[in-house]
Amino acid sequence: MSNEAFFQPGRNCDSVRHADRFSLLIDGADYFRVLREAITRAQRTVFILGWDIDSRMKLTPEGADDGYADALGEFLHDVAATRKRLRIYILAWDFAMLYAFEREWLPVYKMGWRSHRRVAFEMDGKHPMGGSHHQKVVVIDDKLAFVGGLDLTRSRWDTRRHDAQDPLRRDANGEPYQPFHDVHTMFDGDAARAMGLLARERWRRACGRRFAIRSHRAMSGSDPWPPSRAVDLEDVDLAISLTEPAFDGRPGVRQIRQQYLDAIERAQRSIYIENQYFTAGSIGAALKSMLEKPDGPDIAIVAPRMQSGWLQEMTMGVLRARLHRMLEGADTHDRYRLMSPAVPGLETGCVNVHSKLMIVDDDLLLVGSANLNNRSMVLDTECNIAIDANGDPRIQAALAGMRNSLLAEHLGCETEEFARALEGRRLNDAIAVLMKDAAEHRTLERLNPTVAPDVDRLVPPEALIDPEKPVEADQLVEQFVPVDKPHRLIGRFALLGVLALLIVGFAAAWHWTPLADYLNLAALSRQTRRIDTLPLAPLWILLAYVLAAVVSIPVTLLIATTGLVFGAAWGSFYALVGTLAAAAVTYLLGEWLGRDVVRRLAGARVNKLSERVAKRGLVAVVILRILPVAPFTIVNLVAGASMIGLRDFMLGTLIGMGPGILLTVAFAHQLVASLRHPTAMSFAVLIGIGVALVAVSVLLQRFLGRKERAEHDERQRERAARPPHERVVDVEVQASKEAIHEARQAGEVDS
């Protein structure tokens, strides 16, 4: 088969371009290291296109000796400052609020205003409703291009070892994250120049500005290829394929979808797939037809054991389980495997397979940003790179080596060992020969995603999270807005707008006025004494607590102030009643705003509180009040938006905070008394109260920590005692049951 016969520009690709050099970069440590090296060699232009970018991420957390800063934003600033003719253009998706707390705050400020004047940053919002710009592209001097699945953002770096406890695998906040697997490509030549044109067109659409610079003409003698990285394949043609939704008068482009279908139809011996998602109906139907053939290819798919996050698990996870069930039913010749990587010592989570790759036989490689879901086929902006060996033994050997290297990584063996196992065997048989006990070795495990019937019924056949066509605005509104309660939505957004303006105004006043001088312990003490002289003083104090909770002034500061002004007895009473009143009001506010709004406001980490509060009720509230998991106001909002009743919430708040309030008020009152009348006894009482505060906190944390660890160990023992396939099913079903309970309690489904 000739190149022209398979790659057809306008049908299954945009163009076919030549590359002098090509390399497959496996995992973030490989990609980010060579990318940093290449950027330091840039002379005229660097284009960065991405779904997300985080100025705080480190390309080389292991360290670099190039003399530039570690963090991405500062690194780009430094490089631009040392190259007077260099311009860096960064284009990121102007993301939906759904992802706001998963991404860096104020990216325009971090990557634009604070950077060098020759670093331009823009947010790309020119896309249809429900769509996103998902391409992950870097182009340097129009001479070197990177295309694949890795964004320059948080929680992406990892080595090929995927060690369970790698100390370098931490985000910008120092928090560890689960092992992360992905692939990227690097190439030069005319193919890289074509990617430079694509980057300029993306910039023009987003910003309305064109570029006159053509770097490959101006700096003909420079070569940005990183010398430290070997070339995997020389002198090869690449097909550049796109997905673009119809928008702003432009027709839709679905080249990637067609290329996937053509590649599957072409397969004879094997189809190897790595993908974050596996939900596209058209791809599933094509694979099903191959399984029904008596002489069809082996199909091996590597995917994450569980989707990341509650929302994805209850949507993409359900759709994946349905597709898996369909393919299993068609697999009468035992040629289909769905697997996930397992790493020993990884107690929670899984290896997050984020790659988007397909290798057909030893002849065809497809890799890029497109997932095997409906969004990547029609709705999101995607870019893939493909190579067709077209019978060339040199290219076939290179593609086979890439596939063998990836499978060897997942199976915990050497590439040569997997190649030997493959000799004379089908692909899935070779994998089975090298599979090991996941409790002790790196390996691949069979994956059998299932969901409870109730959850399956909840998700429609064409879920909006993975649409097969662009979502119309009216359809989106009908799905998420009750037609009989439009006033409730208007009220929520009006309140959110007012709160946002109040917060912005409060921050501005704190920065540019003497407000900060008035919000300290001494100033609050003076104001509280004035309140004490007013009529109905107790009511004013309660109102102060409520207002303070709404604007997130630390409640501990108010409690201490109350103790200073009113003494131990009345101070404790006012502080306890005021805290309970503030908790009740912000709980009701969270209930009124609703779970989805609060989750978007609270973010990924605090979202876990909602699940725990829903599951453990009164006990969870007590624990959250004792342990410093989240701010007072956030806990209240999350509790209100969860399924716990007001009675349990208030009782848990009283039990969890009551002793601490009494001790804090007594400590503040005794501190003032000791300063006014210093005696040995007064300081002894003060020290005793302080020791009691610390002791109670330590004992409670140890007690609760042991309880949590004991429960976790018991779950692990139960899971380890079951066969491997039942362990996966148990995790999936448990997540489904919790989601059903949550939805029922929230009134979203009938019981």
Image: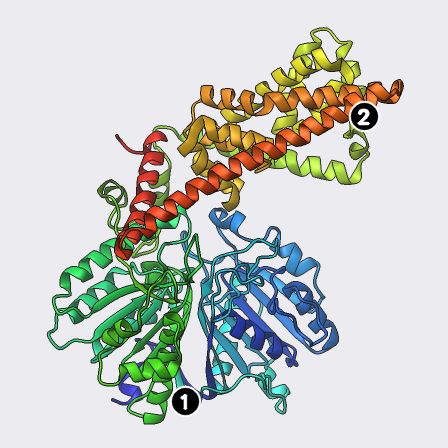
Does 738 appear above or below 194? above
Query: Residue at 38% across / 48% down in the picture?
Result: 716
Query: Residue at 52% across / 51% down in the picture?
Result: 102
Residue nearest the observer in this picture, 373 or 322:
322
Q: Quadrant of the C terminus?
A: top left
Q: Quadrant of the N terminus?
A: bottom left
Residue 228 screen position, x and y as percent: 58, 84
Circle 2 residue: 523
Mark sitting on residue 236: 1
Amino acid marked by disc 2 = Ala
| Pointer 1 local density, CA inside 10 Å: few below 14, some 14–19, many at least 20 | some
Question: Which tag is nearer the camera, tag 2 or tag 1?
Answer: 2
Q: Identify the residue at the far top of this view.
A: 535
Does 703 appear above or below 645? below
Does 721 appear above or below 540? below
Residue 575 in sight here: yes
Residue nearest the observer in this picture, 14 or 192:
192
Badge 2 marks a residue whose secondary structure is helix
Question: Within the image, what quadrant is residue 555 found in?
Answer: top right
Q: Is residue 381 left or right of residue 466?
A: right
Badge 1 marks a residue whose secondary structure is strand
Residue 719 screen position, x and y as percent: 33, 49
Amino acid marked by disc 1 = Val
Cα separation, mark 2 vs mark 1, equals 72 Å
Question: Within the image, what quadrant is residue 438 found in?
Answer: bottom left
Residue nearest the observer in this picture, 436 or 521:
436
Pointer 2 or 1: first along the chain: 1
Residue 4 screen position, x and y as percent: 30, 87
| Pointer 2 local density, CA inside 10 Å: few below 14, some 14–19, many at least 20 | few
Question: Within the image, what quadrant is residue 537 found in?
Answer: top right
Q: Is residue 340 left or right of residue 82?
A: left
Residue 476 screen position, x and y as percent: 36, 44
